[in-house]
Image: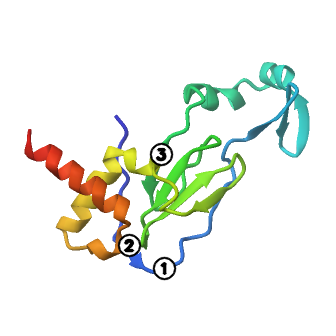
Amino acid sequence: MEQKPNIEPAKKDATPKEIITEGVTPIHDIGDGYVEYNKGLYKRDALKELRPDLFSAKASLNGQSKTGYGTLFPKMAIKGDIFVRVDVLPNRVFKFDGKKWLEQNKTMSLSYLYNKDYIEFLVERISLGEYDLDVLSDNEKAEIEAYLKGNQNT
């Protein structure tokens, strides 16, 4: 089970801290059996034989993108990962394109809402009075409502 991030209260309309991508996904597939690593092009198999450690993080993720949240971007990510920055209000959604984190329109990206831990985080922040429902998207409100209804039946 993943450990929940230690999160400070968000600042309304604050600009997120600088997006640091150094050390994130050190290799990039460019096709035809080649990868880019450290500003150079390499045959994938040759680099994998010389530096298997570069491929172990990707292998452990099974190539599936994941969603997360917190105040700092994860150190390791794969293309397609979604991350919600919760150190600003309203929270901002980012997607990793293989090299950098790009901000997404929250109304167009819904996959982050399937992260149960994130929904529980929102419920907790609302109950503590740190979040106002007005800063949440309609989709976030709907997911919270569904979550609360589901927990009443248990």
Which residue is drawn at the image coordinates 54% and 77% (left, top)? 15
With 97 as the anchor, is 33 left or right in this view? right
**Residue annotated with mark 1:** 14
Q: CA distance from mark 2 to mark 3?
A: 19 Å
Name which residue type carries label 1: Ala
Q: Which sits in the foreground, 54 or 59?
A: 59
**Residue annotated with mark 3:** 67
Mark 3 or mark 1, which is nearer the start of the sequence?
Answer: 1
Q: Which sits in the foreground, 55 or 128?
A: 128
Task: Tell me the SS state at disc 3.
Answer: strand
Q: Nearer the viewer, mark 1 or mark 3?
A: 3
Name which residue type carries label 3: Thr
Q: Nearer the viewer, mark 2 or mark 3?
A: 3
Q: Is residue 23 above or below residue 59?
A: below
Name which residue type carries label 2: Ala
Q: Which quadrant holds residue 36?
A: top right
What number is the disc on residue 10? 2
